Image: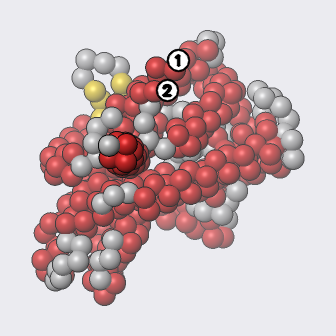
């Protein structure tokens, strides 16, 4: 066991937070699995728990492997991965895989294995690394807006354009995180205002085209509009039904909750093990359980900022913020949806919700953060070794 901990580098508190989140996910996922088993006609609920365990095991394996890679290599890898991601997004749209009746063009079927992969989550991580690379490259340089269009904004808008038709919430989240990162990276605000305006204009044109040719993307734009309208003024829709059941679950939980596995709303709430798992957690573990998760995510945010501040390069600082902030922001959105502070989006709760792609990409992002903090530890270690050698030389010289 000591050998295992010896090989683990990087911020120990981030490792601990990730482990606590993963451990906290088992009982809620297993509890919600009873509904999944009933809907799927499967009487073996343990299989869902085992599947979730394997997703987490593979995720932490990814985290461990990634944190061993020097983070400077991610600069070049992002350049290589951007074209690959674009191809995967196109293939995903053309393949049109559906999962349990969910919208097509979100998942890609992996050949030879019975698995699906949501390519937009991989695209989001790769894109944030790519943007961090570009911002670090132009740091302290005067770059005109025209010069930044092709190397920076063209890949961003290509990725967003390929994700938007099937997943508006993920597109909006990625765009928001890119805007935050380029702002923190010192990109001129006047240029950023133009990009935001262009993004809003592009979205408006997309909606108008989709409304004019509804057969191209059936029900997608109508679903977005109905969710927003339902959030603002209420209505008899599926989203309204989900929020109603989520609020009943939260109200039933009270301070201490009804107890592990005793949730009633998991039998009625769609996506109880993924999109709305926070409501099930509060129902079973009460306000105490909900606050515990919020504290963990806020603690993770604090450590992300600390690691970013201590990074030895501009690229390291921006890289940590680029891949770390979306994790916490996604968690806040998931919780806000459950308490009706935000329209229904379909965003999962990182490291808590079931689903392999979400877990793996979250672990990938955390692994990158740990790689940056591991480099900092390496530098400190070398400095200490240098100080020890200097002290030894001083003692030797005084002795002579």
> Is 191 located above or below residue 257 in the figure?
below
> Is 378 located above or below residue 34 in the figure?
below
Residue corresponding to mark 2: 5
> Is 229 located above or below residue 71 in the figure?
below
The answer to whether the residues at label 1 and label 2 have Cβ atoms under 8 Å apart is: yes
- In the picture as drawn, the residue positioned furthest to the bottom comes out as 190
* Mark 2 element type: helix
- In the picture as drawn, the residue positioned furthest to the front comes out as 400
Q: Residue at x 23, y 77 (%)?
A: 140
Q: Position of residue 391 (x, y in %)?
A: 39, 47
Q: Residue at x 66, y 70 (%)?
A: 233
- In the picture as drawn, the residue positioned furthest to the top comes out as 44
Q: Position of residue 360 (x, y in %)?
A: 41, 35
Q: Mark yes or no: residue 242 visible.
A: no
Colour style of the rendered protein structure: secondary structure
Mark 1 to mark 2 CA distance (whole Å): 7 Å
Q: Residue at x 60, y 62 (%)?
A: 342
**Which of the 4 image quarters holds residue 265?**
top right
Q: Which of the two residues, 148 or 316, is positioned nearer the viewer here?
A: 316
* Mark 1 element type: loop
Q: Mark yes or no: residue 261 visible.
A: yes
Q: Position of residue 64 (x, y in %)?
A: 40, 31
Q: Which of the two residues, 386 or 24, is positioned nearer the viewer here?
A: 386
| CA neighbours of label 2 inside 10 A, class few (<14), some (14 to 19), many (20+) | few
| CA neighbours of label 1 inside 10 A, class few (<14), some (14 to 19), many (20+) | few
Q: Position of residue 279 (x, y in %)?
A: 70, 45
Residue corresponding to mark 1: 1
């Amino acid at each position: 066991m000591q050998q295992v901990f010896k090989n683990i580098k990087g911020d120990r508190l981030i490792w601990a937070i990730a482990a606590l989140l993963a451990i906290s996910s088992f009982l809620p996922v297993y509890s919600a699995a009873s509904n999944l088993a009933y809907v799927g006609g499967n009487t073996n609920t343990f299989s869902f728990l085992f599947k979730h365990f394997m997703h987490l095991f593979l995720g932490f394996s990814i985290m461990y492997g990634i944190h061993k890679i020097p983070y400077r290599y991610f600069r070049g890898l992002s350049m290589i991965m951007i074209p690959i991601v674009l191809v995967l997004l196109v293939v995903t749209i053309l393949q049109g895989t559906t999962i349990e009746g969910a919208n097509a063009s979100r998942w890609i079927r992996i050949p030879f294995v019975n698995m699906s992969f949501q390519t937009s989550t991989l695209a989001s991580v790769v894109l944030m690394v790519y943007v961090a690379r570009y911002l670090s490259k132009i740091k302290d340089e005067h770059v005109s807006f025209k010069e930044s269009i092709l190397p920076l904004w063209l890949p961003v808008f290509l990725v967003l354009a390929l994700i938007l038709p099937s997943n508006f919430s993920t597109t909006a989240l990625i765009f928001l995180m890119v805007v935050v990162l380029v702002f923190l990276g010192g990109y001129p605000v006047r240029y950023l205002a133009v990009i935001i305006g262009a993004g809003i204009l592009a979205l408006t044109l997309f909606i108008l085209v989709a409304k004019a040719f509804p057969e191209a993307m059936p029900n997608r734009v109508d679903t977005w509009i109905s969710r927003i309208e339902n959030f603002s003024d209420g209505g008899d829709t599926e989203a309204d039904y989900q929020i109603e059941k989520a609020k009943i679950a939260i109200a039933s939980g009270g301070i201490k909750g009804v107890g592990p596995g005793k949730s009633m709303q998991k039998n009625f709430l769609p996506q109880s093990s993924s999109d709305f798992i926070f409501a099930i957690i509060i129902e079973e573990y009460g306000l105490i359980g909900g606050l515990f998760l919020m504290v963990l995510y806020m603690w993770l945010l604090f450590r992300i900022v600390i690691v970013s501040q201590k990074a030895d390069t501009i690229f390291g600082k921006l890289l940590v913020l680029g891949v770390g902030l979306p994790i916490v922001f996604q968690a806040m959105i998931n919780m806000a949806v459950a308490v009706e502070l935000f329209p229904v989006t379909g965003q999962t709760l990182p490291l808590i919700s079931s689903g392999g792609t979400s877990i793996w990409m979250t672990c990938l992002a955390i692994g990158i953060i740990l790689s940056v903090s591991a480099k900092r530890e390496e530098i400190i270690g070398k400095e200490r070794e240098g100080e020890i050698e200097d002290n030894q030389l001083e003692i030797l010289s005084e002795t002579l």
